[in-house]
């Protein structure tokens, strides 16, 4: 589903250079975080840093996950044209539970009452397995903290029983009732909120660490849940045996039989089966989110625990094989294109020798062969923006270490008659392809209601594959960096600064015509217009009075994506950072970046204005930045670079630029004598 998020400019891939082997990469959710700040529900649930009383860091993924699935479930449907119909929602049909809450009076002869609820996650409950104050053990279903298993915790959470007082009409008084909340259906995807990390209500963490067998991992990789006709919930977990043969066996957790009148009430419910009609489902561990407490932290009442979250996630072998096959195909296609082109543009990928491309293809083929021979899924450890593939399932399942606390666990339904688990019963969603309509290019201005100066009637009006387009963008600040200095003088960033797109300009290099010059309305309030650098003032982004062609951030992104998908080659200065801020990934083979082109290894990068002064012999950006002027300047620098390349003087010119820059301290308008230049 990365494609779906990427198509809405919510995430941006973090790419590292210099790696020949196929490696997983992380995505930066910068615009997703921006979007969350605009949702009132996110602020009400206190999952954001700037909330009045934010949820403590350790428990925030659980709250965010509940918010996310419920919010998406309200927005997504398998049939968008019939939202008011009985068509099941996408997430609800995948991981939704039916629960029946049955209230039974103990001392009064009255029929049990029942209510139905629907939930998307299982909240683990630990009450019967914890130590009571004073060191006495609270007994619950015959288990206690020192010998509780994961199957015991999960079974109790799926068939929870508690006693409380409720009003009885028969006696006109409060009477004691037994309230049972029983799961009556099983979903294909089992999402579990562990409810025990952090500093508050965290008693359950001891259950994870003081398991029945501390030498074994508490979290099982394979579990099986069965809803019996008697209303009882049975949970089995597959564990390794202690014998030398290293076999596996099922450990079973089964509760007490329910009273007959409660069972009859359950059977009368129309929700007594799972959506697929199955009452016994086997699950395989798919993902675990854990909180890692920073070692050496001291916790007091005024400060919550410090730490960060990590994700262990299973990567099916078929996913790996598909991804590597696609990489091999693209490498071969790119190699063929390089051979067939007479005048290759100076893109970021043009400097990669053909031999290097072939080496990458060979390594990818070797990796594919290894995957085919292994026959096993792999696991990823995602720690911030770092990904490590060589992690086994045991690392995800282990919680003996005092610094690791469970947050979220996800299981996926698999076939019950196969221990290899090569195939699961939940279809993996294919990444959809989004065809962006050309009408996006003609979106009218928010402020004036007028169409853009350059109208697109059909695809022939736009540049296509291999055509050059000059691009530049201006940005404003929507969040200041929040930091402090430590005792050693180093800077500790508490909250990173964020920028938003405020203007973009694109020139069709075939004819020099400006095809896009849009001002962009940010989603968040602007804290600094950066007028000195951007040329943007408050009036330019006013939705009511802006004299410019003003569009939304999403429409600006879609315009860029149309040109990217058409295969246009973007020419500009510092495009890598521009695209990262816009949150669009453009392949290196479609980027001509003059900041990279006019650069020597291990030397400083040169500003656009300095290059224009030296190479083009004119000044620019004297008052404020103008994105059209910058785009044209970058294009002219590229044309000059091609001339230098053809003349064989490019390397000398580049060295001369650095020599001159050092002598004038990279400042413009400094006059030096010819004698100093010779030196």
Image (cartoon, rainbow, N blue to C red):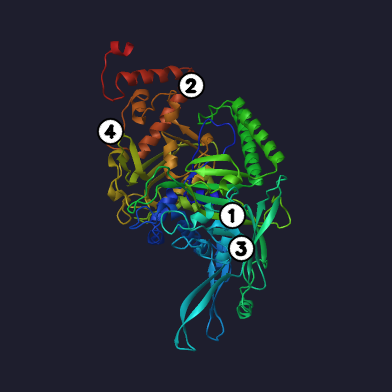
Q: Are marks 4 and 1 in contact (CB under 8 Å)?
A: no
Give the percent coordinates (x, y) of residue 6. Answer: 51, 48
N-terminal of the pair, mark 4 or mark 1, is 1
* Inter-mark Cα distance, 4 to 1: 73 Å
SS for dot 4: loop
Q: Label 4 belongs to which residue?
A: 622
Residues packed near mark 3 inside 10 Å, few (<14), some (14 to 19) or many (20 plus): many
Q: Residue at x 48, y 87 (%)?
A: 169
Q: Position of residue 559 (x, y in %)?
A: 47, 47
- Judged from the image, the secondary structure of the residue bearing numbered disc 3 is loop
| Disc 3/disc 1 C-alpha distance (Å) | 28 Å
Whether residue 456 is visible here, answered yes or no, is no
Instruction: Check disc 1 and report its element: helix, strand or loop.
Output: loop
Marks 1 and 2, the one that precedes in the sequence: 1
Which residue is denoted by mark 1 in the rendering? 212
Distance in Å between CA atoms under marks 3 and 4: 63 Å
Badge 4 or badge 2: first in the primary sequence:
4
Label 2 sits on residue: 645
Give the quadrant of the C terminus: top left
Identify which residue is drawn at 31% across, 14% down.
677
Mark whose residue sits in front, 2 or 3: 3
**Residue 628 spot, x, y in % from top left:** 37, 38
Callout 2 touching callout 3 (CB < 8 Å): no
Of discs 4 and 1, which sits in the foreground?
Answer: 1
Find disc 3 in the rendering and name its residue.
187
- Whether residue 598 is visible to the viewer of this picture, yes or no, is yes
Q: For this view, does 389 lie left or right of residue 229?
A: left
- Badge 2 crowding class, 10 Å Cα cut-off, few under 14, some 14 to 19, many 20 or more, is few
Neighbor class of circle 1 (other Cα within 10 Å; few <14, some 14-19, many 20+) is: some
Disc on the earlier residue, 3 or 4: 3
Label 4 crowd (10 A; few <14 / some 14-19 / many >=20) = few
In the image, what residue occupies the spot 48% across and 18% down?
Answer: 647
């Amino acid at each position: 589903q990365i494609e779906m998020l990427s198509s809405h400019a919510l995430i941006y891939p973090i790419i590292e250079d210099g790696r020949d082997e196929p490696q997983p990469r992380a995505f930066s959710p910068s615009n997703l975080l921006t979007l969350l700040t605009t949702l009132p529900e996110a602020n009400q649930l206190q999952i954001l840093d700037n909330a009045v009383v934010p949820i403590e860091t350790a428990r925030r993924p659980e709250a965010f996950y509940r918010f996310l699935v419920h919010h998406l479930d309200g927005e997504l449907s398998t049939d968008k044209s019939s939202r008011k119909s009985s068509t099941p929602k996408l997430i609800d049909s995948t991981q939704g539970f039916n629960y029946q809450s049955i209230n039974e009076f103990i001392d009064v002869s009255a029929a049990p009452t029942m209510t139905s609820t629907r939930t998307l996650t299982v909240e683990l409950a630990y009450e019967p397995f914890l130590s009571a104050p004073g060191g006495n053990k609270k007994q619950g279903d015959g288990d206690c903290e020192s010998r509780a298993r994961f199957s015991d915790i999960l079974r109790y959470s799926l068939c929870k029983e508690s006693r409380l007082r409720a009003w009885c009409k028969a006696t006109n008084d409060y009477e004691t009732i037994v309230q049972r909340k029983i799961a009556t259906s099983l979903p294909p995807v089992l999402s579990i909120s562990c409810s025990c990390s952090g500093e508050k209500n965290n008693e359950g963490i001891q259950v994870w660490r003081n398991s029945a067998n501390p030498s074994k991992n508490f979290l099982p990789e394979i579990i099986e849940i069965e809803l019996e006709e008697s209303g009882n919930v049975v949970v089995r977990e597959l564990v390794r045996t202690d014998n030398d043969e290293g076999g596996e066996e099922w450990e079973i957790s089964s509760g007490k039989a329910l009273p007959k009148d409660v069972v009859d009430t359950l059977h009368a419910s129309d929700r007594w089966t799972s959506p697929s009609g199955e009452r016994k489902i086997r699950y395989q561990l798919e993902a675990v989110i854990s909180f890692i407490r920073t070692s050496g932290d001291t916790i007091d009442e005024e400060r919550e625990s410090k730490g960060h979250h990590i994700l262990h996630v299973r990567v099916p072998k078929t996913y790996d094989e598909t991804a590597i096959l696609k990489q091999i195909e693209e490498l071969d296609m790119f190699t063929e294109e390089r051979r067939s082109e007479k005048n290759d543009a100076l893109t970021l990928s043009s400097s990669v020798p053909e031999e290097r491309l072939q080496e990458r293809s060979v390594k990818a083929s070797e990796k594919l062969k290894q995957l085919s021979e292994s026959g096993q899924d792999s696991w990823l450890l995602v720690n911030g923006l770092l990904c490590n593939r060589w992690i086994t399932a045991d690392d995800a399942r282990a919680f003996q270490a005092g610094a690791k606390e469970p947050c979220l666990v996800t299981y996926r339904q698999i076939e019950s008659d196969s221990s290899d688990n090569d195939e699961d019963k939940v279809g993996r969603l294919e990444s959809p392809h989004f065809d962006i309509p050309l009408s996006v290019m003609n979106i009218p201005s928010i402020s004036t209601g007028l169409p853009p100066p350059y109208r697109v009637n059909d695809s022939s009006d736009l540049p296509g594959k291999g055509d050059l387009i000059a691009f530049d963008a201006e940005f404003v600040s929507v969040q200041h960096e929040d930091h402090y200095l430590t005792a050693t003088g180093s800077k500790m960033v508490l909250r990173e600064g964020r920028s938003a797109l405020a203007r973009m300009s694109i020139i069709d290099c075939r004819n020099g015509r400006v095809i896009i010059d849009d001002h962009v309305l940010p989603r968040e309030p602007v804290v600094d217009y950066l007028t000195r650098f951007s040329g943007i003032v408050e009036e330019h982004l006013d939705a009511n009075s802006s004299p410019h062609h003003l569009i939304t951030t999403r429409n600006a992104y879609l315009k860029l994506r149309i040109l990217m998908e058409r295969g246009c080659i973007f020419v500009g200065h510092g495009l890598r950072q521009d695209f990262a801020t816009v949150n669009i990934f453009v392949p290196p083979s479609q980027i001509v970046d003059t900041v990279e082109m006019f650069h020597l290894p291990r030397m400083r990068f040169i500003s656009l204005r300095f290059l224009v002064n030296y190479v083009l012999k004119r000044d620019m950006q004297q008052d404020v930045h103008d994105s059209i002027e910058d785009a044209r300047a970058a294009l002219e620098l590229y044309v000059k670079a091609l001339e230098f390349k053809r003349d064989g003087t490019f390397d000398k010119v580049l060295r001369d630029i650095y020599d001159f820059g050092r002598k004038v301290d990279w400042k413009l308008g400094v006059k030096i004598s010819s004698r100093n230049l010779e030196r």
